[in-house]
Amino acid sequence: MKSQSHVSTRKTHDVIVIGGGSAGYAAARTARDAGADVAIVDQGPLGGLCILRGCMPTKAILRSAEIAALIGRAKEFGLFPVSTNADLSAIVDRKDRLVREFADYRIQQLHDPKFTLYQSRAVFRSPREIAVGETILSSQSYILATGSRPDEVPIPGLAQAGYFTSDTILDLRTQPGSLIVLGGGSVALELGQFFARLGTKVTILQRGRTLLSEMDEDVGRALEGALIDEGIEVVTGVQLLRVNCDGRRKTVWAIQDGREQSYAGEEILQALGRRPNIEGLHLDLAEVTVDNGRIVVDGAMRTSQAHIYAVGDVNDVSPIVHLAIQQGEIAAYNATHSDRQAKELDHRLDAEVVFTDPQVAVVGRSESTCRAEGIPFLTASYPFAEHGKALCLGASHGFVKLLCAPTTGELLGAQIVGPEGGELIHELIAVMYYHGTAADLLRMPHYHPTLAEIVTYPAESIVEKLGIG
Ligand SMILES: Cc1cc2nc3c(=O)[nH]c(=O)nc-3n(C[C@H](O)[C@H](O)[C@H](O)COP(=O)(O)OP(=O)(O)OC[C@H]3O[C@@H](n4cnc5c(N)ncnc54)[C@H](O)[C@@H]3O)c2cc1C
């Protein structure tokens, strides 16, 4: 029998971006603006994690929980109590409407006639060639931006018992009576508080000694206090052992304080982290170095192959959207300006916000990173419980903490646990951007009474410690 010969189409571009989420789109736009012939390859669904299953859907549903929590406190503000029964299905409908709107806009951007969009999976055939369906593409540069997915954790019995991840729980329309949350990071805490505020009994099981264990301990402890005050059970320092399922009840067994304990609930949310999406890309054929499931990149976002860059969640450097965008822009600049000095990632102003209530917002260095790197610092903090505007709002959990250089008072970092922390941190980011000092914060006018003026109190303490004005 004669074998049929297979003819593939071949095409060439200046820059090929694999993945059209936040990082990939930013890279494609930057390369296009530099005059390059750019192709984007995305297997779909188009829109990216931030819009479809990350930042935007979570923030949409959190707003419902925030309103429910305020209504639940009506009496405290001199109002007659009203029912706060939640309709999870209606909350999901509202979220879906918003997500559709955001996704449609992103899809429209990806169909920009100045790009070539291939809606297919990309597979490397060699360091210079990829297969996209029947088409073989080659390019001078590649920018990998394929994102991440929930990690699979080998806890005996978990898969058999069944569990949600942040990807799947966002579509749940029947509110569980109780929920065990595995993990104490931002995704675990935002979603855990969401369900608790709708009336689900929530237990958070965290391996670290504090919540948000990559941040300073006082940050995690302040948030823990606020969550416990709302009725959430927070268990830290646990070692997860196994899970079993008996009818409608799932039981998680763990060691805490040296003793075996069990925690039962109707559902489990597994929020123990995410892993880069590299399966199926054939990075071995691209000869790209992968270490422990992660693509190794330098400050210019280059992989071990100088013409292949990796940006966003896929490199696991900072899985946060504005940093993914920044990385995409740096990679695209470097890919299109080989004649100029390479741009590099600067971590000085790295910031993160956790949209719990109180919010957690950090920028720059923490006490623990200063200590680890031997960087001297002065610190001062001020509690929201002593801040007039926060008391008027009935939002007294948390504090603002500043870290400054001990000779100049230059702001090295800041941490906020408190109302609107995610908004307030931007003043401190701006001051740090311009290498401002605690004295600058004091001299800058702050309207009264605002939440923002709280930063002047720790700034005052730092200026007193420095003995300058
Ligand atoms: C629940 C949750 C809440 C979050 N909230 C926030 C927040 O409030 N603020 C914040 O800053 N960050 C938040 N994040 C993190 C943020 O969403 C991510 O850091 C960001 O979206 C990553 O963008 P990316 O471009 O790297 O990846 P993605 O947006 O995931 O894009 C990857 C793209 O690659 C495509 N792709 C994958 N493999 C292939 C392949 N082989 N071939 C072709 N295409 C492929 C996919 O289809 C996808 O479109 C949250 C994350 C989660 C999970």
Image: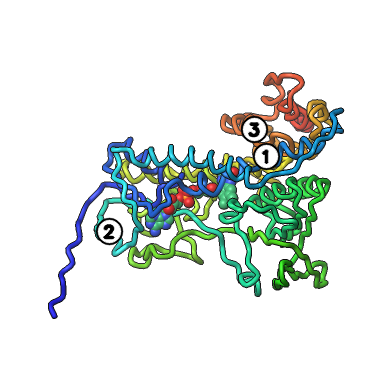
Q: Secondary structure at mark 3?
A: helix
Q: Amino acid at mark 2?
A: Arg
Look at mark 3 in the image and give the residue it sits on: 423
Q: Amino acid at mark 3?
A: Glu
State the residue in front, 279 or 171: 171
For the residues carrying marks 1 and 2, which lies nearer the camera in this image?
Answer: 1
| Crowd class of label 2 (few under 14; some 14 to 19; many from 20; radius 10 Å) | some
Residue 232: percent from left, percent from top: 79, 52
- Which circle marks residue 73 in the picture? none
Image quarter for residue 162? bottom right
Residue 286 in the figure: left or right of residue 82 = left
- Residue at 20% x, 61% y: name it: 8
Gap between marks 1 and 2 measured at Cα: 48 Å
Assess disc 1: are there few (<14), some (14-19) or many (≥20) residues with their C-alpha within 10 Å of its C-alpha.
Answer: some
Q: Which mark is residue 64?
A: 1
- Among the two numbered marks 3 and 2 on one chain, the one whose residue lies closer to the N terminus: 2
Residue placed at 55% from the left, 48% from the top? 54
Q: Position of residue 27 (x, y in %)?
A: 39, 43
Above-or-below relation of 59 to 271: above
Spatial CA span between label 3 and label 1: 19 Å
Question: Foreground: 41 or 158?
Answer: 158
Give 374 or 63, whichever is nearer the viewer.
63
Residue 248 versus residue 51: which sits nearer the camera?
A: 248
Instruction: Say which mark, if any, is on residue 128.
Output: 2
Q: Taking the image as drawn, is residue 376 in sight?
A: no
- Circle nearer the N terminus (1, 2): 1
